[in-house]
Image (cartoon, grey):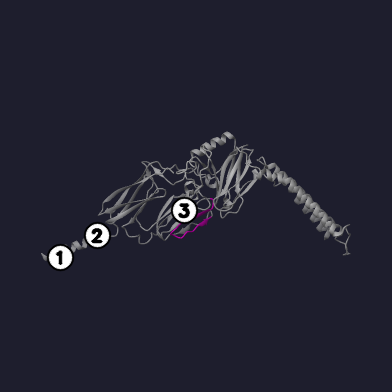
Amino acid sequence: MGKFFAVVLTIIALVSAVPIVRHTWWMPPDISTHGHAIDEQLTDTMAEAGFSFLAAQLLLAFFVWKFSERKDSGPIKSLPGGAKGLVIAALILVGTEMLALGVLGQKAWASVYFTPASPNALHVQAQAGQFAFYFRYPGADGKFGGLHPDKIDEGNQNYFGLDPANEVEARDDIVTGELAIPANREVLLLMHSKDVGHSFYVPELRMQQDFVPGLDLSVHFTATKVGRYEIVCTQLCGLGHYNMKAYLNVMAQDDFEKWLKQKASEQ
Amino acid sequence: MKVNHILMSGIAVLAAAAMAVAAPGSGTVSGKVTYEGTPAKQKPIDMSKEPSCAKEHATPITTEGVVTGAGNTLENVVVYISAGAPDGATAPAQAVTVTQKGCQYVPHLVALQVNQELKIVNEDQTSHNIHPLAKSNREWNKSQPPGSPAISEKFDKEEFIAVKCNIHPWMHSTFAVLKTSHYSVTANGGAFTLPNLPPGKYTISAWHESYGTQTQDVTITGSETKSISFVFKAKAY
C-alpha cells in the first residue's frame, strides 16, 4: 500500500510539473517595455518554487517507499543537531530564497510604480464606471476640462460630466469608448472611478491597477506592438462586472493621429 | 299653441342635454413642433464592449437626445392635455411595448397612461438590466437575460421617467406616463393631433427630453380643428 502511494505521489508530482515547464498555459506575448522584468521575476519564482516542490514531493515519496513496511515504530535515525538544527536550516534556506526573490524582483516593481512618467508622455484620462470604461484625450489645447458629476448625462454621451457650454478647456476634449495609443510612445493613464472599485488590466501589457473610488491614480507604460488588446475589469463591481471591458488599440503614430482627428470630429 | 311651445322647449332641452352628455367630442387640436437655432450634434455610440450588438449596426448609431426632420421639425415630443379634460377613466387594456434591440430602446420614447401595461422585450443576445429612474413612481430595475419572457410592468403616477440600462451605459429612453388619454407623440415631420375633444378650455403641453416643456391654452367650441404650433429653442450643448 505504502509503495503504491509513493509511486502515485511521484507520478502526480511529475505530471503536474510538465505543463509548467512546457509553458502550456502561459501568459500572452509581452507588448510592453517593462514587461520582461516582470516575466523574469515570475519565471524565477516559478523555478525556485517548482524545484522546492518537486524536491519535497520526491523526498516524501522516497521515504514512504523505503520505510512504509517497517514494523518497528521507534525513530529511524536522528539528524545531527536534532529537530532544532533542521528547523533552523530550513528557516535559513527558505528565508534566503524569499529574500533573494524580493531583492532581485523589487526592480521590476520599482521600474513601473516608483519612476515618474517621462515629461512628454501622452496624457489620457480613464474613467471606470458601472459597467464600462471611457477615455478622454485633452484635445488641441492640451488641457482637460473640469469634471462635474452633476452634469453626467450618459444618454447623450457625456460620461465625464463635462461642461463645454461654460468651460473653454472642455470644448475640445475627446471622449472615446476605446483606448487608442501610438506604439512606442509613453502613455500616462490618469485613472479615477465614477462609482465603486474597478480595475484596469491588460494581460499583454503586464499592467494591472485598481480604480479606488475617491483616489486619482495613475500608471504609465509604453506599448511596443501594434494590435488590439482587451482591457478587462478585474475588480468585482456589480451585476455587470462580467460584461465590463474595453479595447486597447495600439497603432502606428500616423494612424493614431488620423484616429484622433476622426474622434474629434465626432464630439 | 302652448303645446307647441312645450314641445319645442322639450326638444331644445333634449338636444342640449344630448350634446352635453355625448362622450367623445369632435373638436381637434393639431399642429407641428419645430425648433429654431442649431441643435447640438448627435454623437455616434461606441458599442465595442458588446460585440453582439456592435455588429448589428453597419455604421454606429447616434444618440437620440434631439431627433430632427425636414423643415426644422422635432421628433419625440409628447403633446398632451395637461388641464381642462378629465383624467382617463381606466387605462386602456392594450399594452405598450418597448424592445431592446441592437442595444437600443425601440422606440426611443414610449407614451402610456397611468396603470396601462408596459411590456419590455429583449431581442438581443446579451442580458439587459432595465432601470427606469422614477422619482414619483416606484423605482425598480430588472435583469432580462436573452431569451427570457417579456417583463410586464405599470406605473400608477403621472411622470416623465428617464430610463437607462445598468449594463450598457449608452442606452437611454423615456417612459411618458400620463393621466390623460389625449396625447400624441410627434414622429418624423413633427406633427401631432389631439382628436375627439369636447368643447372646453384646454391647456396643451409639449414636452421634449432636451428642451423642456411649453404650454398653450386652446378653446374648443364645437367640431372645429384648432391649429397650434410649438417652437423650441435649440441649445448648442
Chain of the residue that carries numbered disc 1 in the rendered image: B
Q: Is residue B175 left or right of residue A178?
A: left
Q: Could you tell me the amino acid type at mark 2?
A: Met
Q: Is residue A55 left or right of residue A225?
A: right
- What residue did someone put label 2 on? B19
- Kind of element beneath mark 2: helix
- Asked if A165 appears above or below B220 in the picture, the reply is above
The lab-note entry on whether marks 2 and 3 share a chain reads yes
- What residue did someone put label 3 on? B163
Residue A107 is drawn in which quadrant?
top right
Q: Residue at x 11, y 65 (%)?
A: B2
- What residue did someone put label 1 on? B6
Q: Which residues are magenta?
A: B125-144
Other residues around mark 2 within 10 Å, as few (<14) / some (14–19) / many (≥20) = some
Q: Could you tell me the amino acid type at mark 3?
A: Val
- Kind of element beneath mark 1: helix
Residue A124 coordinates in the image, percent (x, y): 57, 42
Q: In front: mark 1 or mark 3?
A: 3
